[in-house]
Amino acid sequence: PLGGYIDRFSINDFWKQWLVLGQYDPKALYGAVNSERFPVYHRMDIGVSKTLFIYFMTCTLDFSIINVYDRRNIFYFDDKTGERVDMLPFLPSLSLKVQI
C-alpha cells in the first residue's frame, strides 16, 4: 500500500490509449486506516515562575526549558521528499510580564 507517501508517486495514464469500450478510471490503493505509526515520542518541559510586587506594579518572571534532554522527536514527514522533520530541540526561554 501507498499509505503515507501517496504524493511521492505519479500514476500515468498509459493504458487509456488502448481503451475501446467502457470506462477507465485509475485509482490509488491506500493502506488500511491507521496502518502506519510515528516513532515513539517523549519530551520533558520544565518551568519556574516568580511574582514580585514592586511599588504599584506586579512583575512576573518566567524561565522555562522545552525538551530538557534534547530528544529528537518527529514532527512530520515531508510529503515531497519523504524526509523526517523534527520538533524543537533544547530551547530555554525567559520572559518578564509587568502589570500596572
Image: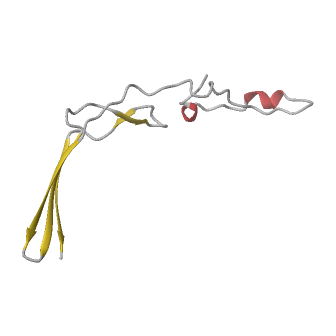
The answer to which of 81 and 84 lies nearer the viewer is 84
Q: Name which residue lies at 61% across and 28% down.
A: 33
Left or right of residue 9: residue 60: left
Q: Is residue 65 above or below residue 55?
A: above
Q: Name which residue lies at 52% across and 25% down.
A: 36
Q: Name which residue lies at 38% across and 25% down.
A: 40
| Coordinates of residue 69 in the picture (x, y in percent) | 20, 32
| Coordinates of residue 12 in the picture (x, y in percent) | 68, 32
| Coordinates of residue 86 in the picture (x, y in percent) | 33, 36
The answer to which of 87 and 97 lies nearer the viewer is 97
Quadrant for the C terminus, please. Answer: bottom left
Q: How many marks?
A: 0
Left or right of residue 25: residue 44: left
The answer to which of 33 and 52 lies nearer the viewer is 52
Q: Residue furthest right?
A: 21
Q: Quadrant of residue 23?
A: top right
Q: Is residue 48 above or below residue 54?
A: above
| Coordinates of residue 27 in the picture (x, y in percent) | 72, 31
